[in-house]
Amino acid sequence: MAVARIPLHWDIFCSVVDNYGDVGVAWRLARQLASEHGVAVRLFVDALAALSRLAPQVDAGSDEQRVQKVDVLSWDGPQKDAPRAAVAALGDVVIEAFGCGLPPNYLAAMEGHAMQPVWINLEYLSAEDWIESCHGLASRHSRRSLTRHFFFPGFTAHAGGLLRERHLFARRDAFRARPEEQAALWHMLGVDPPPAEALKVSLFCYPDAPLQTLLDAWANGSDAIFCAVPEAVADAAIDAWLATATAASGRSFRGGALTVARVPFVSQEDYDRLLWACDLNFVRGEDSFVRAQWAATPLIWHCYPQTDAAHVAKLGAFIARYDVGLAQGASTAYAAFSRRWNGDAAGVLSWSALTRVLPDLQTHAQGWARALAEQKDLASNLVRFAADRV
Ligand code: TRH
């Protein structure tokens, strides 16, 4: 049987729409392809300042640089031509992240090439069933003699998988086994390590989350809560709450049973560690949502808000998969809390109901991560998908 050849040169184009998810996924994928699959990766990003927040080694002022085995290049988006050097050597595989479009001269070069690159549109993650029937489909370009393939990340074996590095679980478990590393993380974040009895929470959400209700419930409760909030997250609600709190130590503020720590926005690696250090993670969008699942602890997802409430359907599809095997009480409390957090009036933001089922959710999160990790990861699936088409 012929062995498929792994394509050696990959170009990834990413346009930053808003936030950090697009570039976060593209950067993670680029690094994994380069380090685990040994391929040469050029990552084109039109807003290097966004990338340099999650990857501080990236110089936002440099048009071309090599960071963690990835060639990072700046481009001006799909309306303008790419630098001539980029077009002179095309990738064997071209990933268009989230339908961002490709530069006109790059498209023309692809069309004119005897061995056309495999062109893949990497789509947004969804737990909805319909993605399975669209995953892998090919579509002819309307004007050019080119074919694009649609690749959907997902939670089942019939989709493209999730980004997961080879030794991720081993690194996570080693970190959790070493209290001194956890203490070092808190110090690096500018706060004292939380007391052992406190429930450690990280909070990454969109500004419209009903945070005030939650902060009040935490502050007025009887159990100690330590909540780490990266800077620029939920500023209005956090600032309003901080005005009622007293300064504790470093970046920490206390009010009732709640301590809020305003921590810096850190690199992707350190953000993983923050998720691993916490007992409950509030995450959002796409990439932090996946990372919290790999942390194998309970998570509350704030889905990227869409005007037609499509995010509520997306949330429902995720919960329908996630809660299989959860005890009835835990499933009800989890769904109600998650729905309300995402603006669905059918939900209820009951912290007391959620906190009662946290032990169940903890066990469940471990089983969920283990089962998901039995599937192939997204980068490996992409490599195979491309190899079958070169
Ligand atoms: O930033 P986001 O809201 O991104 C969103 C989603 O991807 C959404 O689907 C998309 O449509 C929209 O962008 C345009 O959330 P997300 O996906 O979790 O991305 C955040 C990235 O930031 C992720 O890679 C983790 C990283 N991060 C850090 O590296 N350090 C930090 O301190 C924090 C809080 C996040």
Image (cartoon, helix red, strand yellow):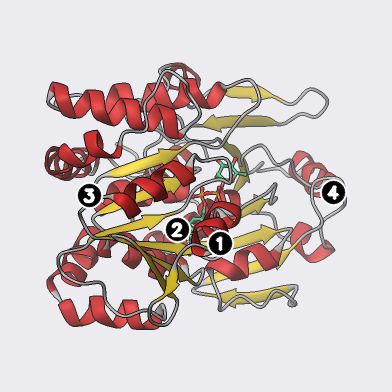
Which of the two discs, 3 and 2, sits closer to the camera? 3
Among the two numbered marks 4 and 3 on one chain, the one whose residue lies closer to the N terminus: 4
Residue picked out by circle 2: 33
Instruction: Measure how far apart labels 4 and 3 are at the Cα level.
Output: 44 Å
> Is residue 41 depicted above or below 154 in this figure?
below
Question: Tag on residue 41?
Answer: 1
Disc 2 vs disc 1: Cβ atoms closer than 8 Å?
Answer: yes
Disc 4 vs disc 2: Cβ atoms closer than 8 Å?
Answer: no
User: What x and y, as percent, mark residue 310?
Assistant: 56, 22
> Is residue 305 depicted above or below 215 in this figure?
above
Badge 3 element? loop
Badge 4 element? helix
Instruction: Measure how far apart labels 3 and 2 are at the Cα level.
Output: 24 Å
In this picture, residue 212 sits left or right of residue 168: right
**Front residue of this view, candidates 88 and 27:** 27
Instruction: Measure how far apart labels 2 and 1 are at the Cα level.
Output: 7 Å
In this orientation, does residue 301 appear?
yes
Residue type, label 3: Ala
